[in-house]
Image (cartoon, rainbow, N blue to C red):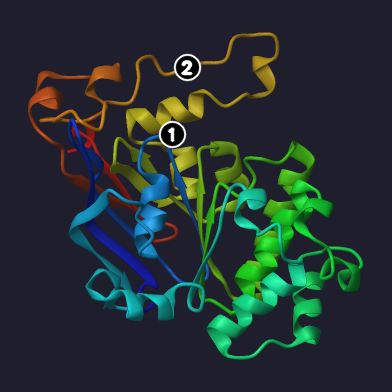
Amino acid sequence: MGRPLLQIQDLRMVFHTPVGKLKALRGISLTVDRGQIFGIVGESGCGKTMTARAILGLVPHPGEVTEGHILYNGEDLLRLNQHEIRKFRGKRIAMIFQNPQAALNPLFTIGEQISAVMKQNRGVADIDEIIDLIKDTGLPNPEKIIKSYPHRLSGGMQQRAMIAMALSSEPELLIADEPTTALDVTIQAQILELLTKLKEEKGLTILFVTHNMGVVAETCDSVAVFYAGKVVEQGTVRDIFHSPKHPYTQGLLATLPHPGSRGKDLATIPGVVPSGFADIPGCPFASRCRYVMEICREQQPIWTETRNGSTGFSHKVVCFLHE
């Protein structure tokens, strides 16, 4: 399959606060191959968005990446200065955010904002190309859209405009950070269908950040399950859903509604994600795990890897149950 487009190795991030260091990422490692939609899933506060921001050098103050590597086509993005990382940001790697209303500038039209991005990353902006981008996202009457201000568009239309803006620089990697969270269910489905279509037509690689396992099942090719700033399981969507190895992944899947759950209480995972200020000597999921053993509280488990015999794809898990 060749060299992966993106490799993250032992990525660690802290936020310096008046009461101590908050550990946002505790050693994230994952591999994203070209041409796939790769999902990052987990509860709020597990490090999904911070990982996405670290790729683009957009870690908010007072956050700091303290260790690790982010290899993009083999080049370590963490070793680049701000001028060098700007050559990647928007041009080779683009990002769409969960709240398009906050990301779009209310003082400029959609066309002006897409044009500004194109000029920044490519030196020139072509109005016909902007109209074609609007058409690609499925927005009706693109000539009218480019003259419209963001507040004149619905949430779904704003998100499509954001996707058009992200694609204007012809990136190789598109990071989608909870792009459907603020939208109703029908519009969510349309945006997910659009991203899948764009991946096929433009050869995009998409890193899809979400807390919704149902969205992962519908959209992604592979997935990494995040918990408390760590990856606890990674594999193809088929392997993860048909044969989940980590108790946390099993718990997430158990919470999904299914045909037999109508009228019944949905399953939950008891407890809460450990505080980022806490030192965790063992498995971070130990306090919530029904299979917990004494070793889980005292030592950190290591990666265990298996390969699907029919596909050859790797399925990795960090859990003492599988060592």
Q: Amino acid at mark 1?
A: Ser
Residue 185 position (above or below residue 163): above
Work out whether residue 120 or residue 216 is closer to the camera in this orientation and state it: 120
Tag 2 residue: 268
Label placed on residue 44: 1
For label 1, the crowd category at 10 Å Cα-Cα, with few meaning under 14, some 14 to 19 and many 20 or more, is some
Q: Residue furthest bottom?
A: 124
Depth check: 187 or 220 in front?
187
Query: Where does the image place residue 62, in percent across and percent down from the top left?
Result: 28, 48
Q: Quadrant of the N terminus?
A: bottom left
Q: Quadrant of residue 75?
A: bottom left
Q: Kindly identify the residue that appears in the image at 32 percent across and 74 percent down.
A: 82
Label 1 sits on a secondary structure element that is loop
Q: Position of residue 136 (x, y in %)?
A: 77, 71
Image quarter for residue 31? bottom left
Can residue 153 be seen in the rendering of this structure? Answer: no
Q: Please give the name of the residue rendered at 48% of the width and 39% of the height, measured from the top-left corner.
A: 242
